């Protein structure tokens, strides 16, 4: 069959996503790797000090990685139970009418811009946390975790719901027919059957939290130290890039270091995407 | 005992839903109450005055509008054409899967990484400078997965019978796609596009180094000008400048405008989807 | 002497590795109604879709043998399958108007085939709707969505859509299986009238329908053409034992 001009070009359009992915990786490599000429990779990743504008500067991103991991872990403590709770409720308990009302709420929650979350965290949550925990400053890893948790919740909820509602009805009926009640059916039959989809939802939730920028920039307090204390300010990787790129002269070591952080972030999130893909397949 | 376990379990699920609804309403109501105090026609239609301590946010509204339009002009055709290829033309299963993995991976890339890519490629390499064009292209790549996925779903939902009937009167594949498939899939594609606009309008990190400026007296008059944008404006008001007692109220006003804008965009998309589902007769 | 519109010679068709039509030799008479019947899965719809090459849409379809339309091989001599489909129209089992207005549904094929003149298109659309006996029912609502019509009306609209482009052959794939008895009677009557102008092939699993509307009948079983003769003859004195068993309800 003869194809017209646009039809011939279609495969190229479809492959553009990969072009962009490779383009992003390539750019991050080109702009990021020059930093390894002066700072070895090992010292870059495991260095404990991030003093980019000191003389001499130090580029160790361990505190930034720790910051990212802390707020992400904190966020998951909120996003996983509440997100899964929503997913199970929507798929197993809610009737159609309730579902049609609740689902838009979750979508709207996902649609709130991250800068608005950050703003909300700064003006309301941070002072509140400062007061009830008697802290000197309200912008902490804990504050960021709470907000990030709410932000990652819709991701977990919507993907987990897809997985749970695609569990065949026959399984539930078999469980009920054996005399199990609803809770037993959910916890012993439905959730185990949807296990891999639920896992994928959690992985993508992690990706959402670790890549979030504006919120952590505004509420995490931006202090590049390694601390186990959730009530101290931290400085995640994303926030570092966003905050410092504006002042880093193009082509300087600082500039390259920020791209290298971008590369680390990119590789982490691509890895998470691929893991999630693997679990979705099951 | 079993009964009590079930009651507690189901209660926990209800609490998760309550948590989502309350979080969303808390953000919405708190920001609305504070924000509507400063909101008036002047606030919407005036330029900022006296070092950002007075006046309105008109240039930021216009800037966000321009960026969103530019994003869609770029991402919509690419996304729809990719989806057409994936659903109607691509035959090789492995290729389809590879492209889909690419789409998912691109969707998982952190927004700040898109910002780095835009800075290195559009601002520097292509020499577009910090401009509407650079920002729109960066945002366009970011929302491409949203548009591809929505279009794919919409095109897939077009019944096979419509296509057969069109072929049976002698239409070519391309005629069938442009005259039957796309018009039938339009509501779904529009929904996806609107959600994409909502996402683009609310994002800050990708435009941080590619498009925005804190203050601009004149409106942009070409796509090579930098712009103000609502999300960045909130961030800048909260973190830059010295007169926070004047800036915070303006930030509230800006937040309510941005939140209102993004929420109505999402709401419209949800409405179109529900109406489309009801109107469907095939 | 009967003129034959479509002739197949040693036609075989496979989906992948499974044979679906086996050595079919059939000659379809012009300006008559030919019914193809048989139990489900016998290949009757597949055979119908050979005539307008709609099987081409399914990956892995292979064909050997010849299919001649007016002595031209539709797989070799007719290069442009879109032109073939203009000559061989089709009405489907699942009633499938486009989600467009009544007018646009009928005009669709005309526009596809390059008609530009608005008044000509309009005239042709009106004539086609008149030909299928739908005019009085829809003349005031030509610009309403086709889905506002009843199922039977929609099917007649689909017939109007098929004949608007002036085909020479019209294929009907179980056109009444989704319709009520009254609509079915109307469609059958319409098929009677249409044979003056067109060569008609109708696939059906309804024996009474085959007996009522057709001049010739083909009986198929598991991809084989068992018997092909005048309808009267087949229903009164079938030659093959298997045909007789089918007609007397022993299987199917």
Image: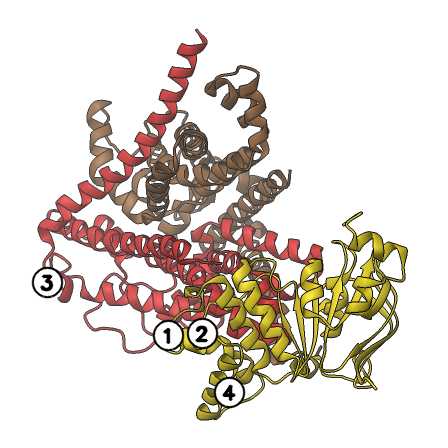
Is the residue at mark 1 from the same chain as the one at mark 3? no
Residue B28 point in image, percent of width and height? 23, 43
Mark 2 or 3: in front is 2
Is the residue at mark 4 from the same chain as the one at mark 1? yes
User: Residues under labels 4 and 3: Cα distance?
Assistant: 57 Å
Is the residue at mark 2 from the same chain as the one at mark 3? no
Helix, strand, or loop for circle 1? loop
Q: Which residue is mark 4?
A: C124
Q: Which residue is mark 2?
A: C102
Q: Residue at x 40, y 32 (%)?
A: A86
Does B24 sit above or below residue C49?
above
Q: Which residue is mark 1?
A: C141
Q: Quadrant of residue C34?
A: bottom right
Chain C display color: yellow
Give the chain ID for the brown colour: A
Mark 1 or 3: in front is 1
- At label 4, counting other C-alpha atoms closer than 10 Å, the crowd grade (few under 14, some 14-19, many 20 or more) is some
Whether label 1 touches label 2, CB < 8 Å: yes
User: Residues under labels 2 and 3: Cα distance?
Assistant: 48 Å
Label 2: chain letter:
C
User: Residues under labels 4 and 1: Cα distance?
Assistant: 17 Å
């Amino acid at each position: 069959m003869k194809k017209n001009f646009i039809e011939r070009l279609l495969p190229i359009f479809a492959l553009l996503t990969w072009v962009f992915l490779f383009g992003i990786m390539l750019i991050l490599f080109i702009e990021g790797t020059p930093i390894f000429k002066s700072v070895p990779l090992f010292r870059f990743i495991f260095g404990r000090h991030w003093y980019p504008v000191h003389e001499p500067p130090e580029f160790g991103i361990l505190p930034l990685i720790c910051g990212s991991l802390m707020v992400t872990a904190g966020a998951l403590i909120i996003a996983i139970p509440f997100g899964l709770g929503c997913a199970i409720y929507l798929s197993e308990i809610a009737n159609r009418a309730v579902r049609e009302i609740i689902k838009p709420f979750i979508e709207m929650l996902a649609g709130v811009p991250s800068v608005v979350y950050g703003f909300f965290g700064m003006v309301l949550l941070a002072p509140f946390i400062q007061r009830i925990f008697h802290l000197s400053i309200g912008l902490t890893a804990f504050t960021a975790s709470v907000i990030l948790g709410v932000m990652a919740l819709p991701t977990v909820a919507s993907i987990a719901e897809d997985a749970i509602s695609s569990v065949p009805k026959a399984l539930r009926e078999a469980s009920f027919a054996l005399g199990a009640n609803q809770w037993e059916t959910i916890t012993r039959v439905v959730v185990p059957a949807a296990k891999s989809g639920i896992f994928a939802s959690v992985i993508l939730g992690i990706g959402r939290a670790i890549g979030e920028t504006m919120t952590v920039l505004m509420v995490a307090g931006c202090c590049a130290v390694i601390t186990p204390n959730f009530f101290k300010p931290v400085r995640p990787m994303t926030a570092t890039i966003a905050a410092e790129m504006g002042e880093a002269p193009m082509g300087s070591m600082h500039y390259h270091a920020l791209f290298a952080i971008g590369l680390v972030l990119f590789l982490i999130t691509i890895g998470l995407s691929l893991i999630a893909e693997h679990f979705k397949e099951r | 005992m079993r009964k009590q376990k079930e009651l507690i379990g189901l209660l926990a699920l209800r609490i998760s839903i309550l948590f989502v609804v309350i979080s969303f309403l808390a953000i919405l109501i708190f920001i609305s109450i504070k924000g509507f105090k400063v909101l008036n026609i002047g606030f919407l239609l005036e330029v900022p005055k006296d070092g950002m301590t007075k006046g309105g946010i008109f240039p930021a509204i216009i800037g966000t509008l321009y960026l969103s339009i530019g994003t869609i002009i770029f991402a919509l055709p690419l996304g729809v054409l990719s989806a057409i290829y994936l659903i109607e033309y691509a035959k090789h299963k492995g290729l389809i899967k590879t492209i889909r993995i690419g789409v998912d991976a691109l969707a998982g890339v952190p927004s700040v990484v898109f910002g780095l890519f835009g800075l290195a490629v559009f601002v520097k390499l292509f020499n577009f400078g910090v401009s509407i064009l650079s920002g729109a292209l960066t945002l366009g790549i970011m929302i491409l997965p949203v548009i591809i996925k929505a279009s794919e779903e919409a095109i897939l939902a077009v019944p096979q019978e419509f296509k057969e009937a069109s072929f049976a009167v002698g239409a070519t594949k391309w005629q069938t796609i442009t005259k039957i498939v796309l018009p039938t899939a339009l509501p779904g594609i529009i929904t996806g596009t609107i959600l994409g606009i909502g996402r683009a309008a609310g994002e800050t990190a990708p435009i941080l180094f590619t498009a925005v400026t804190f203050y601009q007296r004149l409106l942009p008059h070409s796509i090579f000008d930098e712009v103000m944008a609502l999300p960045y404006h909130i961030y800048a008001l909260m973190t830059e400048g010295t007169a926070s007692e004047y800036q915070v109220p303006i930030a509230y006003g800006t937040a309510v405008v941005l939140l209102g804008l993004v929420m109505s965009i999402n709401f419209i998309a949800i409405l179109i989807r529900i109406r489309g589902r009801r109107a469907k007769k095939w | 002497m009967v003129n034959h519109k479509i002739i197949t010679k040693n036609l075989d068709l496979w989906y992948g590795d499974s044979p679906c039509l086996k050595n079919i030799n059939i000659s379809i008479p012009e300006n008559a109604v030919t019914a193809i019947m048989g139990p489900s899965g016998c290949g009757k719809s597949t055979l119908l879709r050979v005539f307008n090459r709609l099987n081409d849409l399914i990956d892995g379809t292979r064909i050997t043998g010849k299919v001649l339309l007016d002595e031209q091989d539709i797989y070799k001599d007719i290069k442009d399958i879109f032109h073939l489909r203009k000559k061989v129209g089709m009405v489907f089992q699942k009633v499938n108007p486009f989600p467009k207005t009544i007018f646009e549904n009928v005009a669709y094929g005309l526009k596809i085939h390059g008609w530009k003149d608005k008044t000509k298109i309009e005239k042709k659309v009106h004539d086609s709707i008149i030909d299928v006996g739908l005019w009085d029912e829809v003349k005031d609502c030509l610009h309403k969505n086709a889905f506002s019509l009843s199922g039977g009306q929609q099917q007649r609209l689909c017939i109007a859509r098929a004949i608007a482009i002036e085909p020479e052959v019209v294929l009907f794939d179980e056109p009444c299986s989704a319709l009520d008895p009254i609509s079915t009677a109307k469609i059958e009557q319409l098929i009677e009238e249409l044979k003056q102008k067109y060569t008609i092939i109708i696939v059906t699993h309804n024996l009474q329908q085959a007996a009522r509307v057709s001049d010739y009948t083909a009986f198929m079983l598991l991809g084989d053409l068992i018997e092909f003769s005048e309808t009267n003859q087949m229903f009164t004195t079938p030659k093959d034992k298997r045909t007789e068993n089918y007609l007397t309800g022993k299987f199917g």
